[in-house]
Image (cartoon, rainbow, N blue to C red):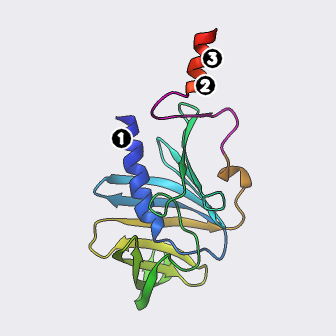
Amino acid sequence: MKTKMLCAMCVLLGAIFLVLPGYAQDFSADMASFSAEGSFTGKIYVSGEKSRVEMPEAVTISRTDKKLVWVLMPNDKMYMEQPFNPRTAASTREKMDGEIERKAEGNEKVSGRNTVKYRVIFELEGKREEVFQWIDEAAHIPVKTAAVDGSWSSEFKNIQTGPQGGELFEIPAGYRKMTLGMPDMNDLLGAIGN
C-alpha cells in the first residue's frame, strides 16, 4: 500500500513538474496539489536544474543534470533511484519541452502575487497537451499550473526567493538504496558460498 501511494505521488508530481518552465532564480515555496490520484501539500525547493519536493511520506529529488530522480523514504532511511524521464522528473528549462504555443490570457492575482495567466500548448511523446500557467513575471516563477480540463493543479504559496542549500539536492548520509525485483545474483552467490 505504501509503495502504491508513493508511485501515485510520483505520477502526480511528474504531471505537475512536466509543465514547469525554467526558473531565473532559486526559490522555495509551500505547495498544494490535487489530481485524480489525490491531494497533497508539501514544500518545494528549486535551484537551477535541481528540485526537491517534500511530502509527509516521501521526498522527491529531481536531478536533470545527472538524469536521475531519487525518491527518499525518510522513515525507512531508504531511497529509490529512477532514470530521468519528463513524466517523472521536474523540467526546469526556460521553455517547456515540445512547446508549440504560449498565449497570454490576462492578469490575475494568485497567492498574493501579480501574475500573467498563459494558455500553453505543448507536445510530449506525440501527444498534444494544454495547461494554464500563472507566472509571476518579476520573479519568473509559475505560481500556479493547472490542466485546462481541470483534472489537476498545483499552486505555490509563501514563495521565498534566494539560494537553496546544495545538501537539499543530495541523498542524505546513511540512506540505503532500495532495489525492486530480482535480488542481485552476486549477493546470492556470496551468501551461498559463506
Whether residues under marks 2 and 3 lie with C-beta atoms below 8 angstroms apart, the answer is yes
The residue at which mark 1 appears reads as 4
Q: Which percent across, then down, holds residue 57? A: 47, 41
Main SS, magenta region, reads loop
State yes or no: residue 5 in magenta. no
Q: In this picture, which residue range is highlighted in magenta?
A: 171-184
Q: Which percent across, then down, holds residue 61? A: 58, 52
Q: Residue at x 70, y 36 (%)?
A: 173
Element marked by disc 1? helix
Q: Which mark is residue 190?
A: 3
Q: Residue at x 43, y 78 (%)?
A: 133
Whether residue 47 is visible to the viewer of this picture, yes or no, is yes
In the image, taking residue 123 as reference, residue 150 lies left or right, namely: left
Residues 87 and 55: in front is 87
Residues 183 and 12: in front is 183
Q: Give, as a three-letter code, the residue at label 2.
A: Asn
Q: Give, as a three-letter code, the residue at label 1.
A: Lys
The residue at which mark 2 appears reads as 186
Whether residue 111 is visible to the viewer of this picture, yes or no, is no
State yes or no: residue 182 in magenta. yes
Q: Earlier in the sequence, mark 2 or mark 1?
A: 1
